[in-house]
Amino acid sequence: MNIETLSRNFGAPGKIVFRQGFAGYPEVAIANKYGTAEIALMGANVLSYRPTGHSPVLFRPAKRDYNRGESFHGGIPLCWPQFGKMFSKELPGHGFARFMVFEVRGSRYTEDMTEITLGLRSDDETKKLWPHDFDLEYTISVSMKLNLKLVTRNTGKTPFAFSCGFHPYFVSGASDKAIVKGLDGCRYTDARGPEMITAVQQGDLAVGAEKDHVFDMIAAPRHEVAFIDDVLKRAIAVVSSGNRHTVVWNPGEGNETPDMAAGDWRKFVCVEPVGDWPGGRTLKPGASDEFVVAIQSNMGI
C-alpha cells in the first residue's frame, strides 16, 4: 500500500495519481478531459466525481475523514455482501466491504477513458464475518460518464447467497424540491418503520422531506432513472444492469447521521441501484455475477 509503489506500478502523471487518504490509507484520483473522480482504497468508496465544467456531483459530509469500521455517508459507498440489514443479522448493515482495504489490480487509460480496478478477496479477516470464499473486483472509470462495474465470484466449493448495491449521495440544491423520473408503475416498499407499506408509484417521484422507498424495477435488460434538481438546473441519469431494485433515500430534517451537519439533509438525495432486497441471490461455485452502473450529469435543464 506504499504510495511510491502504487504510483510506479499503476500511476500516470495527470491521469492516475495516488496520495494518502483516510486514516493513512491511500486514495487515487483518476482524470481526463471529461472529468475527475477520487476513490478511497478503504472501502472502495468513490469520494467525488466532477465532470469537466460542472459542479460536484457527489455529496460529502461535514466530517471529511473516517476510520475502519466507521460509516461514511457520502460519495458512493459500496454495499456488499448485503444491502441494508434485513438479509443477514450476522453481517454489519450494508455488509463489510465498505470497511475493508482494497488492493489495486490494474489501471489503464486512453484518450477518452481513465480506469482503475480494485479487488477484495476472502481471507481470515473476512471469514470471521462471513464464512465464504469469494473474489470481488470493482472497476471505476471516467469517460463521458462515471462507470462502475462490480464482479462477484464464488471461489469456494459451496454456493453462497449475497446481495449488493451502490449507494450514491447526489448533491442537491434542495432535496425536498427534487424529483426522480423512471419509476412510474414500479411497486415499492416504504421501509421507514415496522409497517413496511407497499404501493405502486404513479408518475414522477417527489422526494419531499423524508424518503426511504425500495422500488421493484420492471424486468428489463437495463434500468434508467433520472434525478432532477430544478434548483441546480441539473439532471443526473443513473443507468444500471444486474439489479432488481432502486432505492430513493433521504433522512429528512433532524435525522442526519453523526458525520453530517444540521441541515445537510437538504443537500443530497440518494438514488441507489440495488441487486436484491430484502433477500439475496445464490452464486454457485465457480460462478460470477456482474453489476454495472453508469452515472451521467447533464446541466442546464
Image (tube, grey):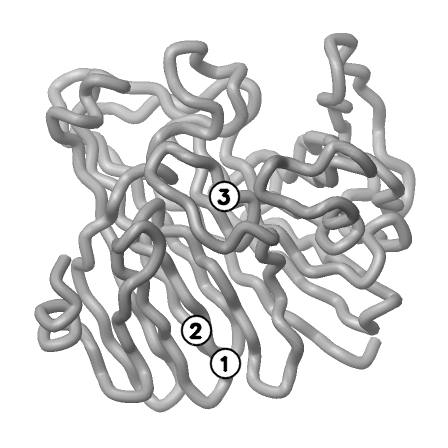
Q: Residues within 10 Å of mark 1 (few under 14, many from 20)?
A: many
Q: Is residue 155 visible?
A: yes
Amino acid residing under circle 3 = Phe
Q: Quadrant of the N terminus?
A: bottom left
The answer to whether marks 2 and 3 mark residues whose Cβ atoms lie closer than 8 Å is no
The residue that label 3 is drawn on is 72
Which residue does the image show at 47% across and 43% down from the upper left? 242
Q: Is residue 259 above or below residue 163?
A: below
Label 1 – label 2 distance at C-alpha: 7 Å
Using the image, tell me which numbered label, if any, was put on residue 142. Answer: 2
First reached walking from the N terminus: tag 1 or tag 2? 1
- Image spot of residue 252 (x, y percent): 80, 37
Secondary structure category for the residue under label 2: strand
Q: Residues within 10 Å of mark 3 (few under 14, many from 20)?
A: many
First reached walking from the N terminus: tag 2 or tag 3? 3
Secondary structure category for the residue under label 1: strand
First reached walking from the N terminus: tag 3 or tag 1? 1
- Image spot of residue 272 (x, y percent): 60, 44
Q: Is residue 205 above or below residue 131?
A: below
The residue that label 1 is drawn on is 35
Label 2 – label 3 distance at C-alpha: 22 Å
Label 3 – label 1 distance at C-alpha: 23 Å
Amino acid residing under circle 1 = Gly
